[in-house]
Image: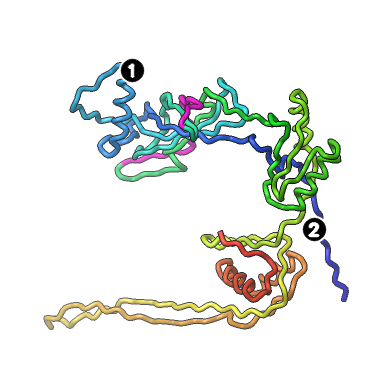
Amino acid sequence: MVASMFLAPAYAERLKELASIQGVRDNPLIGYGLMVGLDGTGDQTMQTPFTTQSLNNMLQQLGITIPQGVNMQLKNVAAVMVTGTLPSFARPGQSIDVTVSSMGNAKSLRGGTLLMTPLKGVDGATYAVAQGNMVVGGAGASANGSRVQVNQLSAGRIPAGALVERTVEAPVGAEGSFTLELNRSDFGTAQRAMDAINRQFGAGTAEAMDARVIRVQAPEPQRRVGFLAQLQELEVTPTQAGARVVVNARTGSVVMNQAVRVKDCAIAHGNLSVVINTEPVISQPGAFSGGSTVVAQTSQIAVNQGGGAIQMVRGGASLADVVKGLNSLGANPQDLVSILQAMKSAGALSAELEII
């Protein structure tokens, strides 16, 4: 019998997918605001006093003073958090999308209008201002205590709902060089990326500093945009990632890459199930006996243990062989997590086991 083994082909990827340019990044923004115009589905002000306080502060800025001791009963106003992302190289006057989420107990934000809300960065400075009508992807109706709802009504999105007021400087190449950062630390991939850059732009253009960082010499300012465009389109074949099995302990999902190998091993796997069935037994006294009806509980307990036979898992040289061997155990994904951990401890699993 002749067994043939085929290695998975290695595919080249653009450097744009493998690495990012240091300094070219997005920045998260956050702001607190008010949404008005709701159809009686806003915050209950007695339970969310910050909504009333925010409205009073806004009215004072508009020249309207609320008398002391007045308790406003609002139904069409809701306090919301507004979040967005400031893209790299954004300029004042450009628009960005924002997401609006309810903070209080508003039933729905459908049909509301977001009032002018400053969006701040991590440094506390205002980088954008959001305002506009929100799009809610859910729907719902309620009557007489019954309620039907599809998707979320307490959050939505405003396309192009914020205007950029301040830019974030990204001096790429200002010091005479660029810095490429690989998405995954790997010495082999860093070496291949450096070689590809030097073949395209000349020897000495790129230098790998470590397993993640590659320093690239920058051309004169008028050629930097075209240089970076060509740089990101270079094709590099990354090295094969190390063998790894990722297990999601919450859902029981098991994902393994093509480098995973197993060695010959014997596994005994069994399930112990205990079934308790309880039924009521009613004792009815005779007529005119003066007794009372008694309800007693009788339980039947059954203990079953199955699947305890020893299964032989043959060593596999490919991912298909590994999956075929593990499937022969007949274990569900939750049980497979325990089996993989035991195989790793026994030295039969040639892979790194990661629990997330």
Give the x, y percent position of residue 347: 67, 74
Residue that numbered label 1 is attached to = 62
Q: Residue at x 30, y 16 (%)?
A: 63
* Quarter of the rendering occupied by the C terminus: bottom right
The residue depicted at 51 percent of the width and 27 percent of the height is: 127
For residue 324, what is the image quadrant? bottom right
Please state which amino acid type lies under the numbered disc 1.
Leu
Is any atom of residue 99 visible in this view?
Answer: no
Q: Which region shows up in magenta?
A: 124-143
Is label 1 or label 2 in front?
1
- Measured in 3D between alpha carbons, the distance from the residue under mark 1 to the one under mark 2, in whole angstroms, is 67 Å
The residue lying furthest to the top in this view is 63
Amino acid type at image mark 2: Ala
Q: How many marks?
A: 2
| Percent coordinates x, y for residue 203 in the rendering | 85, 39
In the rendered structure, the answer to whether residue 248 lies left or right of residue 118 reads right
| The N terminus lies in quadrant | bottom right
Q: Is residue 63 magenta?
A: no
Residue 137 belongs to the span the image colors magenta = yes
Q: Helix, strand or loop at disc 1?
A: loop
The residue under label 2 is: 8
Q: Is residue 142 above or below residue 64?
A: below
Residue occupying image coordinates x 40% and y 30% = 33
- 279 vs 91, left or right, is left
